[in-house]
Image (cartoon, rainbow, N blue to C red):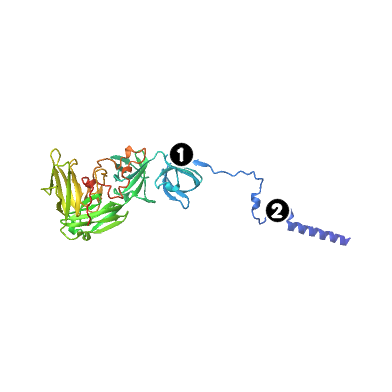
Amino acid sequence: MQKKKRYLMFLMLALSSVCLLSGCGEKKGKITDGSEAYAGNGNEIIEEVELLKEEGKLYVVTAIDTERSTVTLQDWESTREKPFNYTGATYFKGKYGDNLTASQVSIGELVSIERRGETLTNVQISEQVFSYGDVHNFTLDTEKQMITVGGSNYYFDDKISAFYGNSKISLSEISEQDTICLRGIDKQIYTIQVQAGHGTVVLKNTETFQGGYVTIGNLLSMKVVPQMRIEVAEGTYLFAVANDGYGGSREITVEANCETVIDLDELKGEGPKSCQIRFKMEPEGGTVYLDGKQIDISKVVEVRYGTHRLTAKADGYEEWSRILIVNSKTAELTIKLTDKTSEETISTANTNNTNKNNNTNNNTNKNNNSSNNNNSNNNNNSNNNNNNSNNNNSNNNNNNSSNNNNNSNNNNKDVTSGNAAQN
C-alpha cells in the first residue's frame, strides 16, 4: 500500500513536469519563413492608388532625366519643385494632343498632369499657353517687370522662371543679344527659355584704331574706344576693324558665357591700305559724294581704309547719307535712294546682305558707353508675335538669326550681295 502511494505521487509529479514544459497547451512563438502571412482563400482585394486629375493646375517642367525616368515639376502657384516618375505607359502630349516622347518635352514648358501617387500617367502641354520662339528683338525691364516684343508689352511677376539649356538662370543673366522663347497666358510671361546665348568680345591694343570702327558680321558697327567690351550673340562672324589706312578682318566664334579676346595689333597689317569699290545707284542718274567730294561711280573707286561719309543726291529724292567703313580689299556697294538718310554704317567687309531680312538688333557696349544702334525692322517680320499666336511660329521667318552672321542687316541695309575680299 505504501509502495502504491509512492508510485501515484511519482506519477503525479511526472505529469506536472510535462505540463510545465509544454506550457499547458499555450501556443509558443516560432521562427517561420513568413509564408503563412499570405495564406488565404485568394479572395482578398488589393487596394488601388487613386488616379489624381489636377485640373486647372499648371506645372513648369524644370528637369527631365530619361535615364532614371523622372520629370521634375514646379507647381506654378506655390513654386515648390518635386520629381515624379514616369513609365512606358505614361502619355506625353503636345498642346493639340499629338503624342510626344519625354525627350521631346522642353525645359520650361507649362504642363497639366494626371498621376497615380508619385507616378505620372499623363503629361500634356497646356492648351491655354502661348509659346513664342526665336525672339531676338526684345527689351527686358526687370524693374517694371515687363518684356517688350515687336511693340507689344508683356508682363511677369516674381514667380517667373528662366532657363538656359537645362539650368535655371536669373533674369540678370539674359541679354538683349540672346534669342529667347517666351511662354505664358494672355499678356503674362510665365517662363523664358534662352535658345541662343551671348558672349563678350574683348578688344586689346586699341590705340591705332581709336576713333575708327569695328564691325562684327552684319550685327553691329561701333566706334573703337579703350578697354572695349561688346556683348554679342553666340555664333560665328566676320570681325573687321579699320582706321586711317590700317585694318583687317578675320573670322571669330563667340561662345555663350565666354570671352573672345581679339588683339587688334594682329589685324593692323602694313599700311596705308585701300579698297577698290564698285558703286551702283538705284535709280540711276544721281550724284555720289565721298567725304564731300564728287566721285565717278562709273569706274572703280579707290578708297583708303577707315571711316568716310558717303552721300548721294538725285532729282525727286531726298539726300541719302551713310557712314562708310572701309575695311576690305574690294567691295560692291549699292546705294538705294528710296532709303532714308540715317547715321547707320556700311562696312565693305560685310556686303553679303539685302533688304529682305532687316532684323532689329539692339547692341550695347556696357563698359565703355558706346552708342547703341536701335534700328527699325522695315518688313516687320522678325517677331510679329501677335499675328501668329495661333500657330506658335511668329518668328519662323528668321529662325537662325542669332547663329548666322548673314541674317541681321540693320547696319548695312543699303548693300547688295557682293564678294568682299578679306585680309
Q: Nearer the viewer, residue 59 or 406?
A: 406
Neighbour tally class for label 2: few under 14, some 14-19, many 20 plus, Cα within 10 Å: few
Q: Quadrant of residue 269?
A: bottom left
How many numbered marks appear?
2
- Is residue 80 something one can see in this rendering? no
Estimate the spatial distance between the alpha carbons at disc 1 and disc 2, rounded to whole Å: 55 Å
Quarter holding the C terminus is bottom left
**Name of the residue lying farthest toward the left:** 293
Q: Residue at x 16, y 45 (%)?
A: 321
Quarter holding the N terminus is bottom right
Q: Residue at x 12, y 39 (%)?
A: 315
Q: Quick check: 190 left or right of 3? A: left
For marks 1 and 2, give the one nearer the viewer.
1
Q: Which mark is residue 21?
A: none
Which amino acid lies under the numbered mark 1 shown in the image of this protein? Glu
Task: Find residue 379 and report its horizontal and vertical position in percent.
Answer: 26, 40
Q: Residue at x 20, y 59 (%)?
A: 268
Task: Find residue 141 and report its horizontal and vertical position in percent.
Answer: 29, 45
Q: Which mark is residue 55?
A: 1
Q: Nearer the viewer, residue 275 or 86?
A: 275
- Which residue is denoted by mark 2 in the rendering? 27
Question: At numbered mark 1, what does the secondary structure look like: helix, strand or loop?
Answer: loop
Q: Nearer the viewer, residue 389 or 9?
A: 389
Task: Find residue 124 and report its horizontal and vertical position in percent.
Answer: 44, 42
Which amino acid lies under the numbered mark 2 shown in the image of this protein? Lys
Q: Quadrant of residue 306?
A: bottom left
Dot placed on the residue nearer the N-terminal end, 1 or 2: 2
**Name of the residue lying farthest toward the right:** 1
Question: At numbered mark 2, what does the secondary structure look like: helix, strand or loop?
Answer: loop
Establish if 168 lies above or below 314: below
Establish if 372 lies above or below 269: above
